[in-house]
Amino acid sequence: MTKFTLNGQPVEVDNPPEELLLLVIRDGVGLKGTKYGCGAAMCGACTVHVNGEASFACQLTVGDVEGATVTTIEGLSSDGTHPLQKAWIDEQVPQCGYCQSGQIMRAAALLSEISNPSRAEIVDYMSANLCRCGTYNRIFKAVERAAREV
Amino acid sequence: MAHRSTHATLCRRGFLKASAGLSFVVGAGGLLSVDAQAAGSEMLKVNPWMTIRADGKISIIFPSTEMGQSSYSTLPQILAEELDADWGDVVIEQLNEDDRTFGNPAFGGVLYTAGSTGVEGYFDPMRKAGAQARDVLLQIAAREIGVDKKTLMTAPSAVVTQDGTRISYGDLAAAGAEGIQIPGADDVPLKPVDAFRIIGHDIPRRDVPAKSTGKAVYAIDVTLPDMAYACIQRAPVEGERPVAVQDDEARAMPGVLDIVALPDAVAVVAETYWSALLARGTLDITWSETSPFRAHGSEATMALYAAEAESPSETPAVWAKKGDASAAISGADTRLTQTYLSDYAYHAQIEPMAAVAHVDADGKGAEVWAGTQTQSWTTNTVMDVLETTRDRVRLNMMTMGGGFGRRTAFVQDYVRDALLCSKSVGRPVKVIWTREDDVKNGVFRPLAVQRMSGGVSTDGMLQGFHHRVATPTVIGFFNPGRWNAVKPNDVISMRGAESKFYSIPDFLADHVITERQARLSPYRGIGAAYTGFAAEAFMDELAEAAGRDPLDFRLDLVEDNLRGRHLLGKVAEMSDWRNRGDRAMGLAFAGYHSSMAAGVVEIALDRNSGEISLKHIWVAADAGLIVSPDNAHNQIEGAAVFGISCALTERIDIEAGEVVQNNYWDYEITRAHQVPPIDVYMAQVNAHPTGVGELGLPFVPPAIANAFHALTGKRLRHMPFTPDRVLEVLNS
């Protein structure tokens, strides 16, 4: 049994402790907003927060988060109205949308670290996550918009 | 006269019942019939492409599939505009079957989402269908009120009488279509452009909220009761098959349900994907070693295609021809010939191949959840695999985590895998390819060698242009039946080589159809992703040979193309081209099909590492009338970003028939820090829309190559311009 806090709720899972956190979140708990893209820490589609830090869920086992606090896109806000989510809609960021949960979770970690980041800080921080549709410039604008609102 | 309550007017007739409504049967040629629903009855389900319910909800079928291009929102907007619907009343319904009634006119009626054809193909039929439905609603209102239809107008989702009474479309639908004449598709007037209030306006995309909250459901997310998971070990080389499988250890592992032999792969089916992955790692598979593809490597392929480009073993297929290019070039004062190379490229869509299948107990039918670019070929895949009939196929077309051509094949092997696994274990099965599976078993933009020849006169004018492309047929591989119909014209391999935006009196583009030595596929921009590179980089070489500014040299060639001329002038103004001084700027004028883009890039170069970076991109584009302007900007920006990595990093190598690359660490695509500001200008023109999905890509690689020349005096002729190649060129 692994116990951790997921989106504010205590959870206990009986998956093998060496199973990937990403698969436990998606298939065990059933939260599908966190995506599989590469399994190699290269694309960031699986970005979640572990104890507040942006982390690749494909690089952690569920055993790694024993006792930790994990937040996924579903836990970022109860009703999809986090300033970043509103900014994503206002700037019409997504195209295919597949990477955007991870982008938003990384941006949320950035804003909790630096509340009013410069464009250079945003670009640098967001470079961990890939967007094949190429929505990067809109992502930058949306992060700036959200930063103005928090 | 007092304003009457519409509601009261129609209630008097006793028609208002909750489930009543109108079902419009709309075909590609327009409205075919309209069925009135008896009050209280179920909706008739005879191809109900559009329905208006008594509660005012208007359902419009979305005939394409969504992969990020936003036609899910854009196509229904076209119909809603002419219907004069309130966009807020519109419910979009995904077409989940191979019903050719609403096939893509650009693909002979096949349901096929590709080639930036959605808006272009469906624009007229959907406008006419909306206008016909609006006319029917006007007729119903005229009948109900007892006035001449000509006295009635529409406002969003309502008919309005001369005294200002509004009768909602819902109420009219409830009143029924008795005695109504359906007008011919060409007999109803369409709105003038200046009356549009949906088309050309920035209406938010419908799918963006779900994609901003993690709620959008892709094929990889589908979960069914009792569903199992499958992980596939595919043959290392095309054409090989498993001849022996040692799977004792895998079968004994917890959660493993079955090991399934597939024609070219071995699948592990298990209770969880984790169990399937672990078990796959223990398989000991002996593969056949007879495939001729084992003899192929991309270096040798490049050499073969280069030899074919130089002296074709068969007569090249003429792709586009005007005048006599050969004679014009021979007679020119200065003659130039150069060879341009481009490697295989991979789609790198972030959602890898995934599909869920639930095969019926008799093995002759299935429900399938998949993200593909075609209802038609996915249906065909299910029919072929299960040897069954169309009526036994139930599709769920899922929104895709990127397409870019990856999901277009006539036979979809990931769907096939899910079907065979489900059939084998008698449960629904989800197949997920890992990223490595997706790269190693990718289908690629073909490797190409392009031999460019041209001449210039002493007064600096272009005199003859010959664009020869040595590459295989892509259609011949991914859709052989189609190839039989179109041979030897392969639009996927050749698009862009026609240089149709220029007037060149003596012009030839021809295709040396080389032997296929890898799996191939359409890719974003199709042929234009590499033909645009060669055509526009070589155009700069000719301008240099002519002693002309690259802009002036091109302006000579667009004297008959005023819209193109406008774009060149515009992008020059945006980028301050005339005053560029020693800034490293390059210009290119390319596009996609009938959409044009003039682009300028400014680059920086690290001469020690050989790394090129982008400082700015300016693009002036013309795609005819734009339905969704904000989305068009997003698409063009996105394609330009795609073009950056296409130009700088994207490269698949093949050795002994196996793909060398593995994952995003050795197949790099553009990251945030590599993206410059991108300024997009869209020409405002009242002309048929021609598509925006791929338009932003083809100009980027040649503009970068041309900027590199402006900076260094050297030419980059092998795409991608990786640091090692850049250093080699710098030191040459």
Image: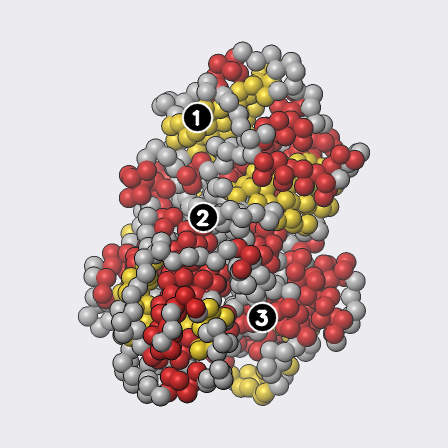
Residue B387: where, in percent of width, then height? 21, 59
Q: Earlier in the sequence, mark 1 or mark 2?
A: 2
User: Residues under labels 2 and 3: Cα distance?
Assistant: 27 Å
Give the labeled residue for mark 2. Answer: B115
Q: In the displayed structure, does residue B665 sit left or right of residue B227?
A: right
Residue at 53% across, 25% down: B504
Q: In the displayed structure, does residue B522 sit left or right of residue A68?
A: left
Q: Chain of mark 3?
A: B
Q: In the displayed structure, does residue B170 sit left or right of residue B393?
A: right
Give the labeled residue for mark 1. Answer: B321
User: Residues under labels 1 and 2: Cα distance?
Assistant: 23 Å
At numbered mark 1, what does the secondary structure look like: helix, strand or loop?
strand
Name the mark nearer the viewer: 3 or 1.
1
B310 shown above or below B582: above
Both marks 3 and 1 on one chain: yes
Residue at 50% across, 76% down: B164
Label of residue B622 in the image:
none
Residue A145: where, in percent of width, then height? 72, 68
Q: In the displayed structure, does residue B378 sit left or right of residue A39?
A: left
Q: Earlier in the sequence, mark 3 or mark 1?
A: 3
At numbered mark 3, what does the secondary structure look like: helix, strand or loop?
loop
Figure quadrant of the C terminus of chain B = top right
Q: Chain of mark 1?
A: B
Location of residue A123 by image quarter: bottom right
- Number of other residues with Cα within 10 Å of mark 2, as a class: few under 14, some 14 to 19, many 20 or more: many
- Number of other residues with Cα within 10 Å of mark 3, as a class: few under 14, some 14 to 19, many 20 or more: many
What amino acid is at disc 3?
A: Ser
Give the labeled residue for mark 3. Answer: B212
